[in-house]
Image (cartoon, rainbow, N blue to C red):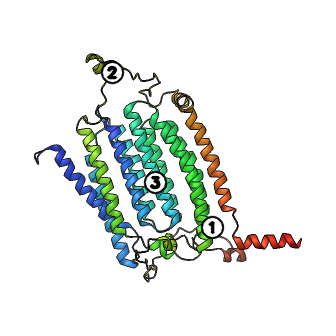
Amino acid sequence: MSPGDPISITGSILAVAVGCSAASLWLLLPRGEGGLREHMASRFGMLLGAVALALFVATGHRLGGLGDEAVFLVVSLVAVISSVATIVTRSPVYSAIWFALALTGVAGVLLVLGAQFLGVATIVVYAGAILVMFLFVLMLAQPTGMAPYDRVSNEPLLSAVAGAIMLGLLTLFIGRLSAGPAECCAVPSKAAALAAGGEVTLSAPSRPAIPADPLAADHVARLGGELFGRHLLAIEVAGVLLLVALIGSIAIVSRTSPEERLDLAARRADA
Amino acid sequence: MTPSALVLNGLIVGGMLFALGLVGILARRNLIVMFLSAELMLQGISVSLVSWSRHHGDWGGHVLVIFVLTVAACEAAIALVFVLQAFARTGRLDSAAWQALRESNLPRSVDHELPAVDAVTPIFPRLTPAGAAPEPDEDALLEREHV
């Protein structure tokens, strides 16, 4: 591949973006420095993060219509920026709020991708989760000041580099997907098999495909049909899983310590 | 079949969310923030699954995301109970409070003395005082200012 190849240019831009995001995360993560130094580090980290995001946007794929592109850009930027804020904010209360904003961004991405039921379900399900998280934080947080374990991180540099390597590998392979059909994963089509004279044994079950219009009126009906048709057994297993988790959490939280049990037994013996 | 541009962008957003959740769960020490980071990774996976579902034009990804939501709910129940128990035992939401569980050949992580919290207090908007000053409320004096 020659250096002037467009794919190689995209690859080098992506490499710069991944490096910028690693440095930005390292600067933004709490490292226990106080005062002006931490302030400057977070400002510089935000700058580097903005550069990395701009580079990622520049290497993104054009969607065609300006409106589609703008909507996807806005919701994905909301999701990614609030995710960064979730993991770098010192106070867990603000972290939960940023996580709620990240969820709205994710729901927007799901809506753009045509998953209207999942987009709404994400918000509905996680609104309760965020509320519970708030209650936990308010119940358990330090009454005065910020806890020292919120102001330092475990190995911030290594963590940021690990995340950036993960991101780099993912973007690399996603970029290869767009470069052309992958030979390794190409599924021989039925027509090709028939043309070759072979016999098609695995006939795909005829199931309702996703309609091209993402806002089709019977989206939820089709999803429900799929869920309670092909995946009926899995639904039952999921129900059992929920029941087991419920019973397990109650059993763990209401378990008493051995001393308390002895105490209870002594009191019962007295009565 | 080459995936469409929307599918590829969705995959990249999903990968970003997953990587950010990974960084959070590796770096942060607060158990609740670690839990939020794990949820962030699940969100990234959901976005990727829906993208692939759009690419293949079937419902498999959507159904898997519904199961991911189910398992996330179970995980939340168990994890929050664990957080509660851990807090009841140590009085901290610190994952390093459980470092006695580490391998015997690993060094103990020691907390260094942290510099004082910077004196820059956040400025919250205040209403303009109007009317007579109210009587001080004893209950309000006992409330904590922030968490």
Q: Percent from the top left, x then y, of residue A190? A: 33, 21
Identify the chain of the residue marked 2, using the numbered disc in the image: A
Q: Which residue is mark 1?
A: A139
Q: Is residue B68 above or below residue B82?
A: above
Nearer to us in this view, A50 or B8: B8
Task: Name the disc covering residue B40, or none.
Answer: 3
Label 3's element?
helix
Amino acid type assigned to the residue bearing label 2 in the image: Lys
- Quadrant location, the N terminus of chain A: top left
- For discs 1 and 2, the disc positioned in front in the rendered view: 2
At label 1, the amino acid type is: Met
Residue A41 visible to an observer of this rendering: yes
Q: Of discs 2 and 3, which sits in the foreground?
A: 2
Spatial CA distance of label 2 from label 3 is: 39 Å
Residue under disc 3 on the same chain as residue under disc 1: no
Q: Is residue B91 left or right of residue A177?
A: right
Identify the residue position indicated by label 2 in the image.
A190
